[in-house]
Amino acid sequence: MSQMRLRKLGRTGINVSEIGFGGEWLERHDKEYSVELLKYAHDKGINIVDCWMPDPKSRDIIGEAFKGCRDSWILQGHIGSTYQNGQYVRSRDMAYVRPAFEDLLKRIGTDYLDLGMIHYIDSQKEWESVLNSEYMDYIHKLHRDGTIRHIGLSTHNPRIGRLAVESGFVEMILFSINPAFDMRPATEELETMFGGYDSDGLSGIDPERAAFYRLCEEKDVNITVMKGFFGGALLDKNRSPFGTAFTARQLIHYSLTRPGVASILCGYDTKEQIDEAVSYENATDEEKDYASVIASAPFHSYSGICTYCGHCKPCPSDIDIAMVNKFHDLASMQPEVPESVREHYRALEHHASECIGCRSCEARCPFGVGIAGRMEQTVELFGF
């Protein structure tokens, strides 16, 4: 069994397991069983857990699992997720926010959060109202005091994600990513985002989402992924908007190949589901191949779009074509190539200038990308 791979979570400097633990299903089970699930995941190399849940049971479960090993976990906890009259309520009212946060620390048995999340903002109006508020003052104070080591934000809206990246103080983002969501334009209405799909709605990767991912990579504000399986719908042919089912490995690989992504947080009901997710670390290219599923689906419009899937391998010049394409996209969205992107590109073992124009990669691309032409454009951008 190979070791769990770690990725640096952008400028936080934290190394997170590329497969994480989304905690929202913990309350479904007996406390003892859920504690065992968390410990089992940790034994498998998972080191990051998201706790957006305000209910006492979920928090107590995480606290019990953390005993004796708190510092080996990365805790992504949410500020503004409150429990009122036995119900979850998103709030910016400090009469609820402060006690809910203090309860989170107490129940988990810690005096700090690794990642303190501005909880769930999807509208620009709310983002603007929060910026100069007692709620945000509280978050900045917690950060100054070291009670939260890094400030993050959770959103489903790439426009809010972009504003957070550009704010300068948000260091990472929890964002919803999967092949179906990526075809949807930005929206402030969750009902629209999660609603029904039809063939007209599957129109390739939404440009605003693609630009947001590239900005995250460029600015080193990295992403942890939620809703990677679309609530299980993408694992079920009858519920999948593509009319075909993906595997967990394929969906994990899809998220992890987006620019700026550090970790995907999966929900687990059983140890077998943890094993299935962690098996990604040993999976073959064929087992991780999401591109063939999309390309053969009844409905898709990814034609001509590089999804960084790696189908183009192998290259006779040993060029990592997917990474070159990724840096091409990062560079081409800017008036001038950012130095950070240039240095990342320079660090590649082989560059676009080494392309011999054989086009064997193009014959393997499921989406008909003109790779040889992109190699030429990359040389023009970077000079080598």
Image: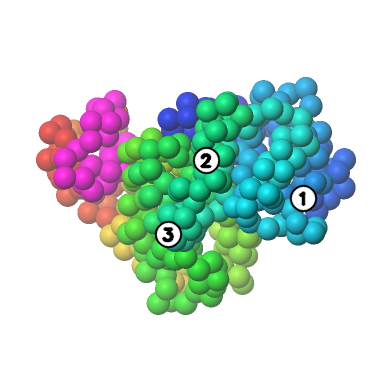
Return the x and y of residue 57 as percentages of the image width and height.
82, 46
Check disc 1 and report its element: helix, strand or loop.
Answer: loop
Q: What residue type is labelled 1?
A: Asp
Question: What residue is drawn where x is 27% and y is 34%?
Answer: 341
Is 322 inside the magenta-drawn segment?
A: yes
- Quarter of the figure with residue 60: top right
User: Looking at the image, which is closer to me, 102 or 380?
Assistant: 102
CB under 8 Å between discs 3 and 1: no
**Disc 2: which residue:** 137
As drawn, is 14 to the left or to the right of 40? left
Tags 1 and 2 in contact by the CB under 8 Å rule?
no
| Badge 3 element | helix
Q: Mark 1 points at which residue?
A: 55
- Packing grade of label 2 (10 A; few <14, some 14-19, many >=20) is few
Q: Residue at x 86, y 43 (%)?
A: 31
Give x and y (percent) for residue 307: 37, 52
**Going from the N terminus, do you reach mark 3 or mark 1 first?**
1
Point out the image quarter for the N terminus: top right
Q: Distance of mark 1 from mark 2, alpha carbons?
A: 25 Å
Q: Is residue 379 above or below residue 55?
A: above
Q: Kindly identify the amino acid type of the residue bearing the numbered disc 2.
A: Asp
Q: Which of marks 1 and 2 is in front?
A: 2
Secondary structure at numbered mark 2: helix
The residue singled out by tag 3 in the image is 124
